[in-house]
Image (cartoon, helix red, strand yellow):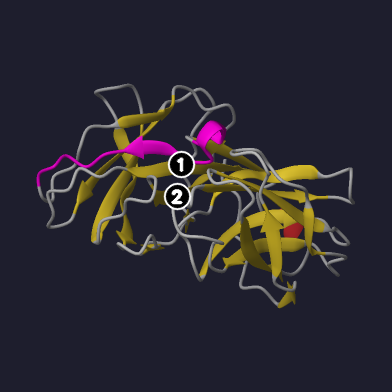
Amino acid sequence: MQWPIPPFPTRASVGGEVNVQTGATANTKGSWITLISGIPAPGAWINLATDRFTTAGDRAILVDIGIGDAGSETVIAPDLIMGNRDYRGTLFPLHIPAGATVRARASAQLTSQFVRIRTHILHGEPDCGLSVPGRVTPYGTVPASSGGINVTPSGTSNVKGSYTELTAATTAPIHALMVLVQGISSLLPNMEYLIDIAVGPAGSETVVIPDFAVWSRDDEIMHPRSPEFWPLSVCLPAGVRLAARCLAVNNTSTTAIEVAVYGFTY
């Protein structure tokens, strides 16, 4: 089943830049904080513009996006990988009701950190809530380490490594996929990765997102060179296996990266 991708937005609501604090214990979510409140119309897209992480070191971080007043939040986009993403936006389609308060909380590998987020809610006409997904399901996230699944290049320049399973069975139908990536620990080589996302049994995988490109830098920053959200009608049923593999472009590095994917369901 497909859904019609929303047309170009007709207006936007913009929140102020806020610090989303992680838990005082490693890999535990901190308190909810408001990103934007009382949006005037249903939201069709959300963009999370992130600023520099608090300190150097292992920048692994997971962010939940929820709606609702304090004490009654409902998570609508769970465990978004947002480490190593200085000065980047993460844009994806999601229905957000008119009048909603959008809030966030975060966990990190390091304790008592924060990530700065400025939120843009993009509105479409007519009722954009009828034409955008209402559910986001993560696959490959590892809350115990605030990260994703380690995917390792082959060690041979420009040759894909073996597939690594992200999930043995999806729990909901998927109509499109988003890929999020961060570095493993604080070790980032200065090079480009190309990542395949595939579906199917081990040994019989079929690529559904080819060569997702990301550039890692030795200053602990990672820059995607492909859009995180791919508006492709993948139409995957619940119960299928997802896997990832990658290569290092013109490099023999075997430094892994952390990968997770997010299934959008109408």
Q: Which mark is residue 219?
A: none
Q: Position of residue 206 (x, y in %)?
A: 30, 34
Q: Is residue 145 magenta?
A: yes
Name the residue at 46% across, 59% down. 56
Q: Is residue 2 left or right of residue 18?
A: left
Residue 131 seen in the figure: no
Name which of mark 2 and mark 1 comes first in the sequence. 2
Using a 10 Å C-alpha cutoff, classify the residue at mark 2 as few (fewer than 14 neighbours), some (14 to 19) or many (20 or more): some
Q: Which residue is mark 2?
A: 58
Type of the residue with mark 1: Ala
Work out whether residue 56 or residue 133 is closer to the camera in this orientation and state it: 56
Work out whether residue 77 or residue 198 is closer to the camera in this orientation and state it: 77
Residue at disc 1, secondary structure? strand
Work out whether residue 201 or residue 225 is closer to the camera in this orientation and state it: 225
Report the span colored magenta.
141-156
Quarter holding the N terminus? top right
Instruction: Confirm or deny contact between disc 2 and disc 1 (CB under 8 A).
Output: no
Type of the residue with mark 2: Asp
Name the residue at 54% across, 26% down. 238
Q: Which residue is mark 1?
A: 260
- Looking at the image, is 241 positioned above or below residue 186? above
Q: Is residue 120 left or right of residue 189?
A: right
Q: Position of residue 162 (x, y in %)?
A: 22, 32
Work out whether residue 33 or residue 204 is closer to the camera in this orientation and state it: 33
Name the residue at 48% across, 52% down. 59
Q: Position of residue 132 (x, y in %)?
A: 66, 54
Task: Give the residue furthest to the bottom.
Answer: 11
- Looking at the image, is 242 positioned above or below residue 64? above
Q: Nearer the viewer, mark 2 or mark 1?
A: 2
Q: Main secondary structure of the magenta part?
A: loop
